[in-house]
Image (cartoon, helix red, strand yellow):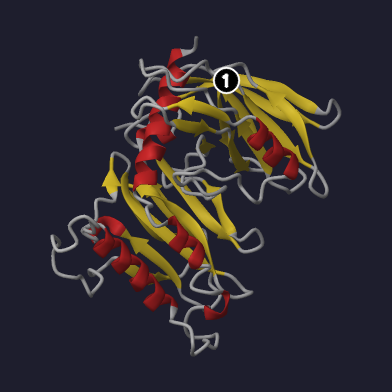
Amino acid sequence: MHLAPVRAARQLSELKAEIGMFKPFASSLATLSLISGAAGAACSRPLDPDQPSPQASLEWMVLNEINAAYFDRSEPMNRPALVAKVPEGVITPVDISHDGVDDWLVDYTDSGLVYCGTGGCLRSLYVSIPEGGYVLAFNDQSFDFAITTRASETVIDTIVHPVMCRPMNDNCAYSFAWDPDLQRLVERPNSRNETLISSSFGILAGPEEDAPQVPESAPSALQARWRQTAAACPSTVSEGSFNIAHAKIDSIPDLDGDGVRDWQYVQANGCDRGNGTIGEATPFMIYLARPGDEVILAFTSQPGEQPVYDISTSPAGLISNPDCEYDQPCRNERLRWDAVLSGFGRAGSDQSRPPAR
């Protein structure tokens, strides 16, 4: 059994569960379509006078979360005074899409809520789109979230939980930029110009709330597989109840040079047995996007290996990353798409090392 990947998978699962605890009002996120498709934020678009402004809607969301945190139906009189003003610095207008309409960052660091954990504090980024309304483009924990400019492009630099990087390390950094055509954040070299991507951190491939849902943007074949492979797992903390283990589907950088993002599929490790294990290691699978809604299975790893993507080139390179321990070098088995063979061929082997402290 591959112990390191299983430990990493468990750590990642625990981190996502921790993040899920910080999203008790998931339905309000959907309502923030945002804040209604007619409400496009601010200055350059006329607002429906019957709809609240984007800022007012976000204030409502945050105040709802703050006040509801103290609510106990069995003791409704036992609570502090109603909070009527959002703490300074929680809601900030930012400019990510450069369309003349304010985008919005909700940073829960100073909200007074327990929305911080081992991966930092929750940040939610809403980006305006041309047809009106907003996209929830980022919704995750991070230790740092900085909006900066590199090579005339607006870039978001984050420092995140060590488990999000390969090798796992305390200087795990990811960067993103807004793609107006895809209406989502896409990967960029980080602030240290490192180009290996090993997590879909921060980018919403699909809702990850208490009841996971299949990513709506995923091809129908992967959605069907996601539903068919769900497993009911007995709860290790609540006798007689069950949890549902789901596969993970992520949009990944283009790997075959057709200019279209491809797909990663990782089957759930199985049920938590309550003894520190979460089942056997599973492989990851790479599906290449094809015209329409089609995909083809192009690669299946060995069980327990982890996917990494090198975005230093276009198309990106695929790395199948075997076992490696925390803060230790990882052996990279590099693969490249071969259009003639219609498959991934070996392109060499090297090591990725943790960044210098």
Quarter holding residue 163: top left
Query: Which residue is more in the foreground, 241 or 355?
Result: 241
311 above or below 229? below
Q: Residue under label 1, please give it.
A: 282
Amino acid type, residue under disc 1 in the picture: Thr
Query: Which residue is more in the foreground, 303 or 356?
Result: 303
Query: Which residue is more in the foreground, 235 or 163?
Result: 235
- Residue at the spot 36% in from the left edge and 47% down from the top edge: 141
Q: Residue furthest top?
A: 1
Image position of 296 (left or right of 30): right
Looking at the picture, how far across and down is residue 44, in whole percent? Answer: 53, 85
Looking at the figure, which quarter contains the C terminus? top left
Looking at the picture, how far across and down is residue 211, in whole percent? Answer: 49, 44
170 above or below 112? above
116 above or below 39? above
Query: Residue 91, can we see it?
Result: yes
